[in-house]
Amino acid sequence: MRKFLFNSAMIGVVAGGWNIVQATRHGPRDWRLLLTWIGWGLSVAVAVGNVVKDADEKALTTGTKKK
């Protein structure tokens, strides 16, 4: 869990999510808002994938793999 909390990509995704929540609360609701949420969801997927990939690469170099 710590690998997700302290990763800079995940911190950026959380900050971006906060901005999108604020835009949803105070801004107009149109097709651009939907595209913003879709883009944020893709960013989350990429960030999680990078964290998992980095953890796997680190496990391969150290010779241990946690499940």
Image: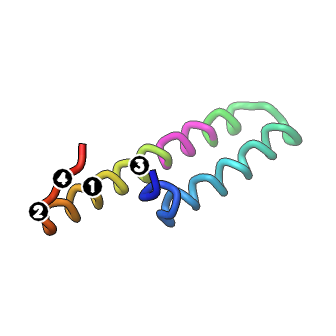
Give the alpha-carbon distance from disc 3 to disc 4, as whole Å.
18 Å
- Which kind of residue does numbered mark 4 sit on? Lys
Q: Secondary structure at mark 1?
A: helix
Q: Residue at x 63, y 42 (%)?
A: 36
Residue behind mark 2 = 63
Left/right of residue 40 with respect to residue 66 in the rendered view = right
Q: Residues within 10 Å of mark 1 (few under 14, many from 20)?
A: few
Dominant secondary-structure state across the stretch colored magenta: helix
Give the alpha-carbon distance from disc 4 to disc 2, as whole Å.
7 Å
Q: Which mark is residue 65?
A: 4
- Closer to the N terminus: mark 3 or mark 1? 3
Left/right of residue 43 with respect to residue 33 in the rendered view = left
Q: Position of residue 20 (x, y in %)?
A: 71, 46
Q: Residue at x 75, y 31 (%)?
A: 30
- Closer to the N terminus: mark 3 or mark 4? 3
Which is more foreground, mark 2 or mark 3? 2
Q: Which picture quadrant has residue 64?
A: bottom left
Q: How many marks?
A: 4
Q: Which residues are magenta?
A: 37-43
Q: Which mark is residue 48?
A: 3
- Which kind of residue does numbered mark 2 sit on? Gly
Residue behind mark 1 = 53
Which is more foreground, mark 3 or mark 4? 4
> Is residue 58 magenta-colored?
no
Kindly check if marks 2 and 3 are in contact, taking CB atoms under 8 A apart as contact: no
Give the alpha-carbon distance from disc 2 to disc 3, as whole Å.
22 Å
- Closer to the N terminus: mark 2 or mark 1? 1
Q: Residues within 10 Å of mark 3 (few under 14, many from 20)?
A: some
Q: Secondary structure at mark 4?
A: loop
Q: Secondary structure at mark 2?
A: loop
